[in-house]
Amino acid sequence: MVRGSPWPVAAGVLASSLVGCAADDAGPSAPANPKDAGSADSHLADAPPPEASKPDGALHDAPGNDAVDAGPPPWCVPATGSLIEHGTFEEGMDGLAPVGWEVRNPSLPNGDCMASGSPQEHVFLSQGPAGCSGHYLSIDGRGKWDCYAIQRVSPYGSIHGGSKYRVQAALRSEGNAPDGSTCPECAAAWFTIGVQWLDANDSFFGDVKNPIPPDPSMNDHGWQVASFEVDAPANATRILVWLTAHFPGRVDYDNVSVTPL
Ligand SMILES: [Ca+2]
């Protein structure tokens, strides 16, 4: 699907319609249920196998996560060479989003999202993460589906079609592993990071989400570095990264990056 930005472009950041969410929020060709997208065969791994044996697209601890004998925890350390700027959330808020990021659907923070809290209760910066200096970003669904996602786009010409990229972030998740028998919709709560592509005309296409853990109980976890690999389509020239506590709980983020492989 190809479509342009429905609202003005500002500061090198492009917007798109909400994708992969509830029917009342989704774009016209977006998958209505995130279970329709992503890789079901991937997982969060506490003890990752050697890098070469990992399946392409697996959500796993990032390289360097074993180096815990000295220095800060691995989730404190930003990736080098990221194509996505402002991923460390050390510049404060700029209105309804952290500096350098934008709200994915501007109609939500002061619209439907108000049913479960103010914008400042849904997206905010906090001190940490554990063991780190600085700040991290929190997105709290507060029981409201797809409330208040944010996004950022890489610079022009930063993506090369056919190349591989690693999407990585320090993550903590809570309240996203509910009992499926009482909340069937909560099966979507695994979704925290998504990417789309832009072509040379700045039209958006594609929909890649972080891999689904093998069990919903794995949706909740303490701070860890998680990553997955994506293959740029032939006509991709930029990448969009979006962050969301999809439903119903809270996800904390830091050091969001996209790096060439
Ligand atoms: Ca930070």
Image: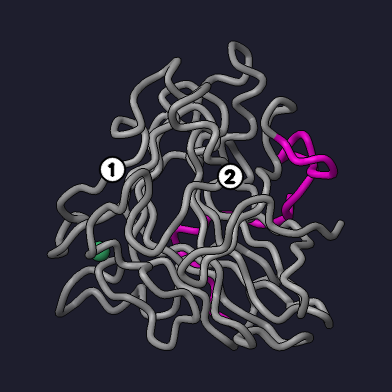
Q: Position of residue 89 (x, y in %)?
A: 29, 61
**In the rendered structure, which amino acid carries the disc numbered 2?**
Phe
Q: Nearer the viewer, residue 219 or 95?
A: 95
Question: Could you say which disc has been placed on residue 195 in the image?
Answer: none
In the drawing, does residue 29 fall left or right of residue 215? right
Asked if the beta carbon under badge 2 is closer than 8 A to the nearest atom of ligand 1, the reply is no
Q: Position of residue 169 (x, y in %)?
A: 43, 64
User: Quarter of the image holding residue 261?
Assistant: bottom right
**In the rendered structure, which amino acid carries the disc numbered 1?**
Phe
> For the magenta stretch, what is the residue range?
26-51
Q: Badge 2, how many Cα within 10 Å: few under 14, some, many 20+? A: many
The residue tagged 1 is 124
Q: Is residue 42 above or below residue 234?
A: above
35 inside magenta stretch: yes
Q: CA distance from mark 2 to mark 1?
A: 19 Å
Q: Nearer the viewer, residue 23 or 64?
A: 23
Label 2: element kind: loop
User: Quarter of the image holding residue 91?
Assistant: bottom left
The residue tagged 2 is 191
Q: Is residue 77 above or below residue 177?
A: below
- Tell me the quadrant of ligand 1: bottom left
In the drawing, does residue 159 fall left or right of residue 2? left
Q: Is residue 7 above or below residue 205?
A: above
In the drawing, does residue 24 fall left or right of residue 153? right
